[in-house]
Image (cartoon, rainbow, N blue to C red):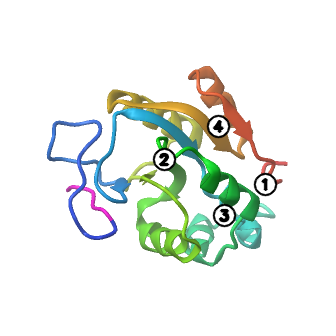
């Protein structure tokens, strides 16, 4: 199965031979690169998921309900403004722990707020490893695809630490979700 752009066209695979694309990668307007990239997490960085945190509190973790409600999140306007100010030569990678099944809600949310992005990478079906391991694997895929992550924005301290270990400077955004 190939990934698609929101317009429905096939997207090229950054980690495989030309013509294929991991289903969890979605290029906005066709594959770009090689080049320098900035990586943004979505929940807690661009998207204010505070209204969904109750699904994960008090010992019960309803991840399905948490992710199903992602399309209703307000925008973190300060980070959105920062995104607007980035040099246009930089590729914008949205790397999220959201499952692929909520890609329609995620794309609609990005469209509603008019956010800039080049590639959206989500957890593939059946992908359950810890977020830091998942994101670390994607950093490797990005590099093999000729994209060089030069900066990341993240709200999970474990993911921030992973980016630092991978040699990617990371700006920590305190969302309050990990206290």
Q: Is residue 2 visible?
A: yes
Residue of label 1: 177
Figure label count:
4
Q: Is residue 130 magenta?
A: no
Q: Is residue 87 left or right of residue 79?
A: left
Residue 55: quarter of image: bottom right
Residue of label 2: 93
3 or 4: tag closer to the N-terminus: 3
Residue 92 drawn at (x, y percent): 50, 47
- Rendered residue at 66%/60% (across/down): 80
Kindly report which numbered mark, 2 or 4, lies closer to the viewer in this rendering.
Answer: 2
Q: Are marks 3 and 4 in contact (CB under 8 Å)?
A: no
Q: CA distance from mark 3 to mark 2?
A: 15 Å
Q: Is residue 143 above or below residue 77?
A: above
- Rendered residue at 49%/41% (across/down): 90
Question: SS of the residue at dot 1?
Answer: loop
Residue 145 drawn at (x, y percent): 32, 33
Q: Is residue 130 visible?
A: no
Residue closest to the eye, 171 or 21: 171
The range drawn in magenta is 1-5
Q: Are marks 2 and 1 in contact (CB under 8 Å)?
A: no
């Amino acid at each position: 199965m190939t990934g698609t752009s929101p317009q429905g066209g096939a997207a090229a695979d950054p980690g495989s031979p030309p013509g294929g694309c991991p289903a969890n990668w979605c290029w906005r307007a066709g594959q770009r690169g090689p080049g320098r990239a900035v990586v943004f997490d979505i929940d807690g960085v661009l998207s204010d998921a505070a209204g969904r945190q109750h699904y994960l509190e008090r010992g019960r973790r309803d991840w399905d309900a948490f992710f199903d409600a992602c399309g209703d999140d307000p925008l973190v306007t300060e980070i959105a403004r920062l995104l607007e100010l980035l040099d246009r030569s930089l590729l914008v990678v949205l790397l999220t722990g959201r499952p692929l099944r909520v890609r329609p809600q995620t794309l609609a949310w990005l469209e509603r707020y008019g956010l800039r992005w080049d590639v959206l990478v989500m957890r593939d079906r059946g992908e359950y490893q810890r977020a830091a391991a998942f994101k670390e694997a994607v950093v490797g895929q990005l590099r093999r695809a000729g994209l060089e992550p030069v900066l990341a924005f993240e709200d999970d301290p474990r993911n921030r630490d992973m980016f630092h270990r991978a040699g990617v400077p990371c700006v920590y955004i305190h969302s309050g979700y990990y206290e």
